[in-house]
Amino acid sequence: MPPRINGSARGSISRALQRTTNSQRPAAILLQSLRAASRHYASASASPLSLGGLKLPDNYVPPTQPPSARRPEERKTQLLRSYTALLRSTPLILFFQHSNLTAVEWAAIRRELRLALDNVPAPVVSPADSNGVPLNIASSIELQVLRTRIFNVAFKIVEFFDPGEQASKSNAYLHDLSSTAYETIRKVEAAADPNSRYAQVAPLLVGPVAAVTFPDVSPAHLAAVLSVLSPSPPTFPPPSRKKNPGYYDAVAQNGLQKLLLVGGRIEDRVFDLEGVKWVGGIEGGLDTLRAQLISMLQSAGLGLTTALEGHSKGLWLALESRRTQLEEEANGGAKKEEAKKEKTSA
Amino acid sequence: MITRFITEVNTKFNPFSIRSRATRLFLSALPPNARQNGMQINTTLLPRTSTQPATLQVKFKDGKEMTLDGEQLGIKGIVEEVDRHSRALQKQADLTDG
């Protein structure tokens, strides 16, 4: 393995240039003014070598920033970025405490979760992509173990750092890994509002934490997840032994005993166990709730019109009944006399 | 932490309270095969609005019961208290076995 940190800047640049000249690309494209290069290479332009008219190759590695030895997907920067993206795009997250689960137990739990999610019937109106093709969110619901500290930082960045507010700083980077973001969350951390969403969730992120992430708020899928991971018989019964024998496997059961649902974040609101169960218990999902709201509003409108109509109707009825009464009185005398005449004649 | 001599662990905590931290960490310090080796672990989650303190009750093989206050002791204090008794039991077990 070649050494990660090169000996000197000059040496590495000359080596890089050698690589450039050895490569088969046309030199005219590669050899451009070094001064035009971005500020990452400021140290290179200070080099005493006369490098005018040369450009560093694309695979040039600055000596002050050697490549990381970690795989890209394991790097903390990458993890932070993936967590901020997760937090921004995920409306429903459930947090679990996992106490020393083994790898086979995780595998068994993920298998059971997948099985339960695949059995969830698709909702009547499912979320669709830009082309209008309905999506099945079941495949995107995942159980993952969080790196708590980095998740904590990512949460702070998502909650407190708004790149739009930093527009006045003309020459500052505004991405999630930037020093601007770091400064912002460090300032906020000192005087964090106890009612902020971050402050509400932060106590949950203690010790080993795993998360189930949903790309969409779907109570049906939430109920399926709850019935597998934290079953509570009346509303969220565990899968039956006949249908799903794998769930009663010793490995899966041991794993499930060590998982503990501590809370959840649903659409920017924080819920405890009961709250999560309440959301999971919404039958038929959001569409049913919308239908209920519409019917409620419609019936309210109907009630209002009848209430407003009621007085005039009552008045009309009263007058009408009075009129008929008067008419009957006017006619009544004649009728009674006729009746008497008939009686006497009979 | 010596967990060989623990037979039962009863915990009750509110996960939304920062003070229940030590109790939660104690649960995660128990070994993965604790339940198979005969340890009873019961956990009750308090609702979010609850202000009850987190409780941790540990029972040992010799019948001793410990009620530990995680808010005061912290995880290090809990481990120290549990180990103090476990070491005595360990010593006895070593003497009888060997």
Image: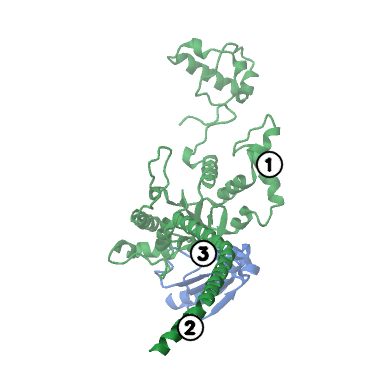
Chain colours: A green, B blue
Disc 1, SS: helix
Q: Which residue is mark 1?
A: A183
Q: Which residue is mark 2?
A: A337
The amino acid type of the residue labelled 3 equals: Leu
Disc 2, SS: helix
Q: Chain of mark 1?
A: A
Residue with the most extreme left position = A242
Placement of A199 over or under A11, stated as above or below: below
Res. A3 in view: yes
Labelled pair 2, 3 in contact (Cβ < 8 Å): no
Please identify, in this view, whether the residue under mark 1 or under mark 2 is nearer the observer. Answer: 2
The amino acid type of the residue labelled 2 equals: Glu
Placement of A250 over or under A185, stated as above or below: below
Give the label on residue A273, or none: 3
Q: Nearer the viewer, residue A333 or B51?
A: A333
How busy is the neighbourhood of tag 2: few (under 14 within 10 Å), some, or many (20 plus)?
few
- Provide residue B23's location: percent of width, then percent of height: 57, 67
Discs 1 and 2 carry the same chain letter: yes
Q: Chain of mark 2?
A: A
- Provide residue A253's location: percent of width, then percent of height: 37, 65
Res. A179 in view: no
Gap between marks 2 and 3, in whole Å? 83 Å
| Snapshot quadrant of residue A158 | top right
Q: Nearer the viewer, residue A268 or A193?
A: A268
Give the label on residue A331, or none: none
Discs 2 and 3 carry the same chain letter: yes
Labelled pair 1, 3 in contact (Cβ < 8 Å): no
